[in-house]
Amino acid sequence: MYSDKDRARGVDGTFMWLMEEVGELAAALREGTKAEQAAEFADVLAWLTTIANVVEVDLSAAVRKKYGSGCPGCGQFVCHCDDSGKP
Amino acid sequence: MYSDKDRARGVDGTFMWLMEEVGELAAALREGTKAEQAAEFADVLAWLTTIANVVEVDLSAAVRKKYGSGCPGCGQFVCHCDDSGKP
């Protein structure tokens, strides 16, 4: 939707926009309505996707690779890792 | 996959994990391989999804609502907004 603009802006400029939206999400989580929170989540995901597009990373494939077979720690779809571990 | 842990951790604790992953993504964008970048993108999206789950926001629906009919500014699927505007 924004690919021409995204490429012109580059990774650094686009990352700044992501950070601005992350800040707005934090504010919405503190005191926003559910609808405001949803809009900010959408914006953060949009900018994350944008950066992935700029560096030519397939975001869907990346998630599938890391989490598509379950928790990377214990390999199960409901995580049974020790609570002391990350996350 | 992590819903019990996520709820116990709450929004604030989960947001801290998101921030850590955003930092790791920034580092990977600077000097990581494509595979390392992809893994960090996956982690950021995973934590974003986690927070949405904790506050019971449907992330897919949120994106559909905000961007499913095209650019919120000009309404087109290839944005034609004035370059001086955001983004």
Image: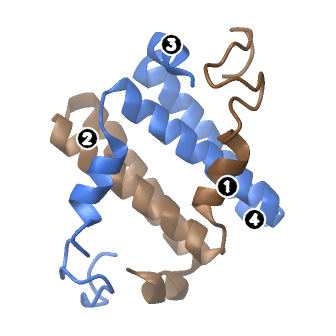
Chain colours: A brown, B blue
**Chain of residue at mark 3:** B
Density class for disc 4 (Cα within 10 Å; few <14, some 14-19, many ≥20) is few
The C terminus of chain B appears in which quarter of the rendering? bottom left
The answer to whether marks 3 and 2 mark residues whose Cβ atoms lie closer than 8 Å is no
Q: Amino acid at mark 3?
A: Asp
**Chain of residue at mark 4:** B
> Picture coordinates of residue B68 (x, y %)?
26, 66
The residue carrying mark 3 is B4
Nearer to us: label 3 or label 2: 3
What secondary structure is marked by label 3?
A: helix
**Chain of residue at mark 2:** A
Q: Find residue A32 and report its image quarter.
A: top left
Q: Marks 4 and 2, Cα distance to the nearest angstrom?
A: 30 Å
> Relative to B23, does residue B30 appear above or below in the rendering?
below
Mark identifier at residue B14 = none
The residue carrying mark 4 is B30
Density class for disc 3 (Cα within 10 Å; few <14, some 14-19, many ≥20) is few
Q: Marks 3 and 4, Cα distance to the nearest angstrom?
A: 34 Å
**Residue sitting at 25 percent across and 90 percent down?**
B82
Mark identifier at residue A62 = 1
Question: Which comes sooner in the sequence, label 3 or label 4?
Answer: 3
Same subunit, labels 3 and 2: the answer reads no
Question: Which comes sooner in the sequence, label 2 or label 1?
Answer: 2
What secondary structure is marked by label 1?
A: helix
